Amino acid sequence: MAKAYWVATYRSIKNPDAMAAYAKLSRPAIEAAGGRVLARGNPAAAFELGLMERVVLIEFDSVEAAKAAYASPAYQAAHDVLGDGAERDIRIVEAA
């Protein structure tokens, strides 16, 4: 079974307090679901149409595990705390 990666890019953070509250809840929820945070922060470089926006890269054992983590009650509680405090794009990509 191929590993999968949850890639989140943040276009803007509108509410830093909501983001901080989300961070306290989301990482333990993701780790409890088997996720491993590999990278987080602003890019060291961006090319072509790349944007210098916050990126979070999380590894899972499978696409199914990544989807289950997102749908889990613990992660959804964190998601609710964030609310509209950030504009972001989350994708799950299967390893080649």
Image: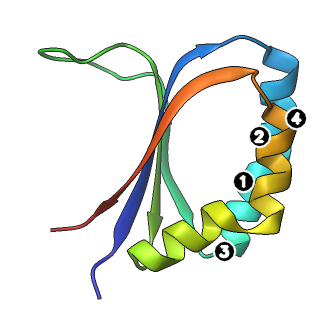
Question: SS class of the residue under badge 1?
Answer: helix
Taking the image as shown, residue 23 lies to the left or right of residue 88, namely right
- Choose the circle earlier in sequence order: 1 or 4: 4
Q: Distance between the residues labelled 3 and 4?
A: 19 Å
**Residue 64 horizontal/vertical position (percent):** 46, 78
Q: What numbered label is drawn on residue 27?
A: 1
Label 2: few (<14), some or many (≥20) within 10 Å?
some
Identify the residue under disc 3: 33
Identify the residue under disc 2: 23
Amino acid beneath label 4: Ala
Taking the image as shown, residue 48 lies to the left or right of residue 84, namely left
Q: Distance between the residues labelled 2 and 4?
A: 5 Å
- Choose the circle earlier in sequence order: 3 or 1: 1
Identify the residue under disc 4: 21
Question: SS class of the residue under badge 4?
Answer: helix
Q: Distance between the residues labelled 2 and 1?
A: 6 Å
